[in-house]
Image (cartoon, rainbow, N blue to C red):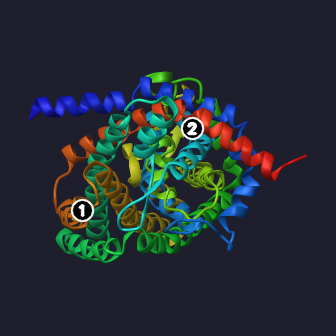
Amino acid sequence: MQAIEKAVAAAGSFAWGPVIITILFVAGIILTVGTKIVQYRRIGKAFKYLFAKDVKGEGDINPFAALMTTLSATIGTGNIGGVATAIAAGGPGAVFWMWVTAVFGGAIKFAEAVLAVRYRTTDEFGEKSGGPMYYASVGMEERYGGNWKWLGWLFALFAFVASFGIGNMVQSNAIADVMDSSLGIPTWISGLVVAVLVGLVVIGGIKRIARVAEKIVPFMAVIYVLGSLFVIFANIEFLPRAFGWIFGNAFNGRAVAGGFLGSVVRFGVARGVFSNEAGLGSAPIAHAASRTEDPVRQGLIASLGSFLDTIVVCTMTALVIFISPVIKIGPDGMMNVLNNLDGASLTSTAYNMALPGGFGQLIVSFGLLLFAFTTILTWYYYGYKSLEFITGEKIAAYYKYVWVVLVFVGAIASLGFVWNLSDAFNGLMILPNLIALIALSGVVFKMLREYEEKYYKK
């Protein structure tokens, strides 16, 4: 068992280490330059498409529901706990590198969704299937010849294994923990209730998952952002200090032990990817199901994910943490965290100290609970489509029953090894996805050029 744990730890270190982080940056730069910063150049058009009512084309869900489904898997743990983890481990400068990841991540998400729609197929149940496993196999074969199914299969395997932990048991465990610590509800009761609710939703497939996501995600995101803005404006005098800490520590490792590359960049980028999933390859699986008549149109909508998730929501979390008394930086540049808090507990304490009457803790706890629930729903779909690619539709059809059982198991079990395993495979998803994205970047650039020539003729 120790040998397995060491192997998993080594895989995790590689997955979130300098090699893949470097490839991620290279991919982001290539796609940002090649698309001429389309993620911000066409951001107005992206929002227009997002709220459009007259959506034509093939697909299972509308574009708004597709984006909300992807955000339901990212807003929550990554924004609430992930930001705090990045700050505690990498210092205030880690937030800057989360922003950098989000800027380039917009172009990556654009490319992922364009390719996902371009190479999607229809399964025997009439649902659309797409994502990295398809453009890494069908797309690569179409452009370069040969058999590239192994690359798509590799991504599908990594995503399938990751889904059990990071998308299922870790989330149900977090829900049970919140309910136990806040209301004294036994973990097995929480696990049973969540398992039943999840079962009622996933049995309806992507359409029912999307309907739940498009209602919960906007509601909770608005409450979280409004609560954060209240804290920020009520303590506006500390805002310059907060930005000073972020930019002042972005290019050095003074605020933490471990140095610049070892902590500030690594934790900023890793948590940035964990937050918005740009480059991970999970989001395009949902975007492939979107109703659209043009892959570029869905790509523009997808590019909003990194902006909304990291630039907006993660920034809110970071600023509240820096404004509240939980973080102090001494004259020597060293950062001190109140009671060595980390993760969601750091965020919860910061909001609770900033908002009176325990309202801050309520926002964080309620937000984590709802977003953990929607994460379970969305990652079921990611895992199901990954298994469908590997085994076919008939075997994958039984996946929902295993998924529901594991929701209950996750609520009552100790998940140290499960977390490490899923975290490693979650990071490993990046590699086959980025190989395909870089190799097929020419396809993305050509499709964008044709789209802009069609709709933006001078």
Estimate the x, y position of residue 366 in percent, counting from the top left.
43, 69
At 48% from the left and 41% from the top, the residue drawn is: 273
245 and 435: which is toward the camera: 435
Q: From what the image shows, is residue 360 above or below residue 5?
A: below
The first of marks 2 and 1 along the sequence is 2
Tag count in the figure? 2
Considering the numbered disc 2 on the image, is that residue within a helix, a strand or a loop? helix
Mark 1: amino acid: Lys
Q: Residue furthest left?
A: 1
Looking at the rendered structure, the kind of residue marked 2 is Thr
What's the mark number on residue 195? none
Dot in front, 2 or 1: 1
- Is 454 above or below relative to 435? below
Camera-nearest residue between 26 and 255:
26
Classify residue 206 by image quadrant: bottom left
The answer, for residue 24, to whether it is visible in the render is no
Picture coordinates of residue 67 (x, y %)? 55, 61
Q: Is residue 194 left or right of residue 69?
A: left
Query: Measuring 45% from the left and 63% from the top, which residue is drawn there?
Result: 364
Q: Which residue is mark 2?
A: 101
- Is 429 left, or right, of 63 in this rendering? left
Q: Residues within 10 Å of mark 2 (few under 14, many from 20)?
A: many
Residue occupying the far right of the picture: 458
- Residue 300 seen in this snapshot: yes
The N terminus lies in quadrant:
top left
Alpha carbon separation for disc pair 2 and 1: 38 Å
- Report x, y in % for residue 127: 42, 65
Q: Viewed as shown, does residue 59 lie left or right of 393? A: right
Report which residue position mark 1 lands on: 394
Disc 1 secondary structure class: helix
